[in-house]
Amino acid sequence: MGVRLSKLQALSQKHWIGKTDAGHRYSTEEWLSKYASEFLAMIPSGGILLDVGCGACQLTTYFAEEFDKVYAVDFSETMLATARQRVDGCGLTNVSLLSGTAQKFPEAVHEADVILSCGVVQYLTLPDFREHLHECRRVLSKGGMVCVAMIPNLALKELYYSKILGHNEGDYVGRLRTWIELRRRHVLAYLRGDLLWDAIGNWFSQRDVAIAASDAGFDVEFRNSWFYEYRFHALLTPVKSLY
């Protein structure tokens, strides 16, 4: 029996089905390497990595040499097909591409030392996110780590709307016009049920993440994103008293 999808997750899957590129801010190999280096600086290497929402493996191929085995998981068959071309082109033999979601990992994944879900949780409601963390807890090895990366920061939502989405660098009048236009777009999106109107989806506070992490049996540490000013990362480790 499959996991029931929330409206946000269903819209997100519809959006990504058929895509072949993850849509990073910059997609050159130089920048992909920089993005990957940020995550590698936060997570331990070695053992088994589970990369949830791997997309076309644009970052996964940079992780692969640091781990004995990599499970790269995505629900989009077109993404996985593109990922296969990239993985084969890089000559990597330790990457297994599997179909799955953030709430239900493939049956082939029994255990992982590190779980990375990068740019995934913005497509989850808070209940979806809790399910994702419980699924991570289920397969995470003793002493392992979960890195929930690129979480849209609710505290910086207005910064994104004005500086990124609105491209606003003007005076007071320009800022006011931008604010009005964004609110107009938001209302229209609400009326047509477009939960992805801002190209983000869901925004989280660090308190939201901390509560969900605690509920799933994790301690959490937060880090700011190097390259995306309105996002943060959460490093989760199992609460030691639960062992």
Image (cartoon, grey):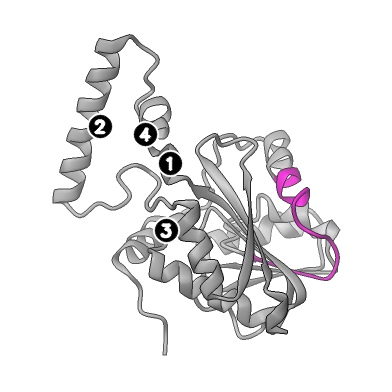
Name the amino acid, label 1.
Answer: Ala
**What residue lies at 70% left-to-right and 80% top-to-bottom?**
241
The label shown at residue 182 is 2
Nearer to the camera, 151 or 18? 151
Query: Mark 3 belongs to which amino acid?
Result: Tyr
Question: How far, Cα to Cα, is label 1 from label 4?
Answer: 8 Å
How packed mark 2 is, by other alpha carbons closer than 10 Å (few <14, some 14-19, many 20 or more), is some
State which mark lies toward you, 2 or 4: 4
Residue picked out by circle 4: 158
Q: Earlier in the sequence, mark 4 or mark 3?
A: 3
- Please give the residue where the numbered disc 1 appears in the rendered image: 155
- In this view, 180 is above or below 153: above
- Cα separation, mark 2 vs mark 4, equals 10 Å
Instruction: Using the rendered image of the protein, determine whether residue 101 is visible from the camera's viewpoint.
Output: no
- Foreground residue, 65 or 189? 189
Q: Is residue 64 visible?
A: yes
Give the mark nearer the N terminus: 2 vs 1: 1
Whether pointer 2 and pointer 1 mark residues with C-beta atoms closer than 8 Å, the reply is no
* Quadrant assignment, res 141: bottom right
**Disc 3 target residue:** 123
